[in-house]
Amino acid sequence: MATQAHCAYAFECLVASFEQRQPLPLAQVEELWEQYHASSEEDVENEGDGELERDETKNAYADKRATALPAAILQHVKDSAVSSDSSLPSITSTSSTSSRKGDVGTPATSQSSLSSLGRGRPRPREKHPLFVTWNTTSRNGDHNLRGCIGTFQPQELEGCLRSYALTSAFEDHRFSPIPASLLPSLSGHVTLLTNFSEPTKDPMDWTLGTHGLRISFSHNGRRYGSTYLPDVAKEQGWTKEETLVSLMRKAGWSGSNSGWARIWRDGKGELIRYEGKQIGLDYPEWREWRDWVQDGGVRHEAQN
């Protein structure tokens, strides 16, 4: 199942592309994400003990957090980041998008830096089919799709996440490329796909809210195909029939609403169902974590 650390890595790759730097490796993001939330839980547990004066508490807090991240990690973060007081460039051009898309593996420099950290938890080279989705949130709280692209071919997780985080942000033909100015309103979502069924000719052989759909069908000598992730139909409040008609129209079919069933009755349609829980993360949550990493694991107290 996808995790928020996977979403954090998607944001890391997207922001790194704007800042023209290499992103932190996925394994490092996962470990630092875990450390960040562990430190947050410790802060909650320690609230209200009141045994130290404010200055003493602040000093002890800083001393404790200063050792949270090994020096090698801090150096790697420092080397890979832009100045903390510089703003993100407003990049809207896609002239370098193709080079971003092609560079889907972890760079050699990042791999060597990762090795130098002496990490004690080797990760298996997991392979997954997945989708990366970007949404924006308007001032009135409405969520709007801004990009969603993925693959049904199992691929190595780190490279696949990096590739589709950028491809869905910059190359979804339904939208203009995401500019840096939209980052504050952005949320990133990752869905790892599992439990694929065998193809079926029955268009109703699936469950609302549980299954994603991948369909293919023929009409007037032309082949069509499209997919909806498991959460789409439920979020839209569609029935099964409404979902199928919408999915067929998404594929480019322009028949009548009553004509969809004929295609399936004639045996010209095929459906594969799959599962996958979408996990999301908002940019402000990622930014807070990334500032914590940049500052060496020190969580700053809010100013009164």
Image: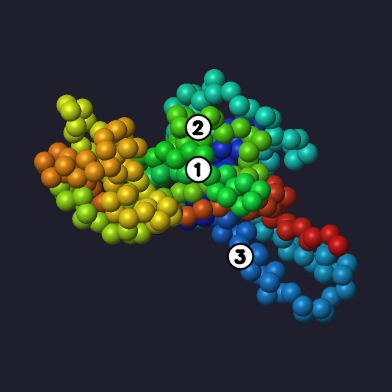
**Corner quadrant of residue 150:** top left
Look at the numbered disc 2 and give the secondary structure of its residue: loop
Find residue 145 and name its label: 1
* Crowding near the residue tagged with mark 1, few <14, some 14–19, many ≥20 C-alpha atoms within 10 Å: some
Residue highlighted by disc 3:
38
Q: Which residue is found at the position 51% from the left and 25% from the top? A: 97
**Image quarter hosting the N terminus:** bottom left
Q: Tell which circle, 3 or 2, labels the residue nearer the N-terminal end.
A: 3
Residue type at tag 1? Leu
Label 1 vs label 3, nearer the camera:
1
Q: Is residue 93 above or below residue 21?
A: above
The foreground one among 30 and 48 is 48
Q: How many marks?
A: 3
Q: Is residue 25 above or below residue 224?
A: below
Is 259 on the left or on the right of 247, as rendered?
left
Residue type at tag 2? Phe
Asked whether the beta carbons under mark 1 and mark 2 sit within 8 Å of each other, the answer is yes
**Image quarter hosting the C terminus:** bottom right
Q: Position of residue 17 (x, y in %)?
A: 58, 32
Find residue 175 and name its label: 2
Q: Which residue is found at the position 28% from the left and 59% from the top? A: 207
- Measured in 3D between alpha carbons, the distance from the residue under mark 3 to the one under mark 2, in whole angstroms, is 38 Å
Residue type at tag 3? Ala
Q: Position of residue 84 (x, y in %)?
A: 75, 40
Is 304 on the left or on the right of 12, as rendered?
right
Q: Position of residue 101 (x, y in %)?
A: 46, 29
* Crowding near the residue tagged with mark 3, few <14, some 14–19, many ≥20 C-alpha atoms within 10 Å: few
